[in-house]
Amino acid sequence: MRWSEIPKGAKAYMVYHALIEPQLIVWLLLPLYMMLTGYSVLDVGVLFTLVNVALIPATYIMGRAFNRWDIKKGLMVIDALDGIAYIFYGLAQGAYASIMLFLGRLIEKVSTILYPLYRAYEQIIYPEDKYEEIFAWHLRIPEISRLISYPILGYIFGYVFFKPEHYRMAFMIFGLLSIPTILYIHFFLPSVGREERIQPEGFKFRVGEFKLLLLFEALFTLSWALAPTFVLINYVVFTLHKTIFEVTLIECANSVAMILGTYLSERFPKEKGFIAMSLGMFISALYALIMALSPPFWLAIVAYMLEALGSAIWFPFYRAWKFSLIPKDRVSEFHAAISSYNRIISLFAPLIAGGLATIHPTLPYGVSLITFVVMAILFLILRVARTH
């Protein structure tokens, strides 16, 4: 699928994700800031877990509400909440630092309550008969943005402005950048109300496959929740004695592999989607295996490139399969319900990940390895079941 063949609204949505991609470096800077100011990796896991606890039912409630409301307004709220959260991070100093970090993290996690709206929005504005092809572009465009911005930001925050007070200022700046992104959503993204969610004739809800989807969602959630970003930062900065710049180099290598992987995924025909998903999972399992063995920095880059390559191969087909199981007239409710379910699965994952990393810095990756292998095998079994 060529870029020129993508509908205008879908293009604008992808460009929006490219615009906000540089701001997501906050996800790297926050745990590093906490560790630089005296928090252990276990402390970070505890704080993140405490914030997770209160948000499970709210996810489903908000998703159900957006069955009637314009989803675009929800995307604007996400950016507004993230901006406020980043400003709280910027205020985290002195005796009230822990309170500000907790409040900021809480506000940021409140914004994630609305994250299912991204998937609901995509299911509606992307052409249904082109999901596999368009999701290759959906991955590609933000990764190009990351590839350009992260080396610059990583060098700045790794070697030029690398003190805690510099990070606090960066949080404030990134928080204010939410204003132009909110305006972009308002003026350039198409609205998605109830009238855009007409369910096509012939849709049949497949209960059996939906149950399998929930199993895969649980395994996906565990595979990444048990090896979160702060585990990588702890390993690279405090075990390998590198800086945030080297962490961003890993992210950039990840982006290169992701972009290349999207072109590979386009070569798989739709009817072989489950084979593509299984192959992608086996490749991701190699990443987890390498990281579990405490690799040197250059090999950690290779490992994360493998993870990105695997994700680029399985993601478009998995997302297309997932969307085929969800009715459009209740799209935000279904995605929110799945997100609430995933939150329950991952509720204590940050605490567990922090505990495992305390025992050994790369132990969390060993647990993730198991989930990737199980998913790869299950996708092959599902492929065989479908052909008989």
Image (cartoon, helix red, strand yellow):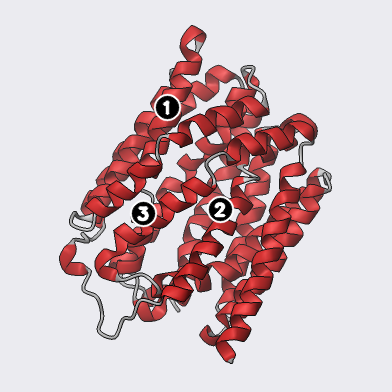
Q: CA distance from mark 2 to mark 3?
A: 15 Å
What element does badge 2 sit on? helix
Earlier residue among tags 3 and 1? 1
Q: Is residue 72 above or below residue 348?
A: below
Nearer to us: label 2 or label 1: 2
Q: CA distance from mark 2 to mark 1?
A: 23 Å
Residue sitting farthest toward the bottom: 388
Q: Position of residue 320 (x, y in %)?
A: 45, 73
Q: Is residue 167 above or below residue 248?
A: above
Q: Position of residue 73 (x, y in %)?
A: 23, 49
Q: CA distance from mark 3 to mark 1?
A: 22 Å
Location of mark 2 (residue)? 221
Residue sitting farthest toward the top: 95
Q: Amino acid at mark 2?
A: Thr
Dot 1 crowding, Cα within 10 Å, few <14, some 14–19, many 20+ = many
Nearer to us: label 3 or label 1: 3
Q: Which residue: 63% across, 21% down?
A: 39
Viewer can see residue 252 = yes
What element does badge 1 sit on? helix
Q: Tell me if 47 is positioned left or right of 23 in this view.
A: right
Viewer can see residue 18 = no
Earlier residue among tags 2 and 1? 1
Q: Which residue: 68% across, 61% down?
A: 372
Location of mark 1 (residue)? 104
Q: Is residue 108 above or below residue 278?
A: above
| Res 76 → quadrant | top left
Location of mark 3 (residue)? 336
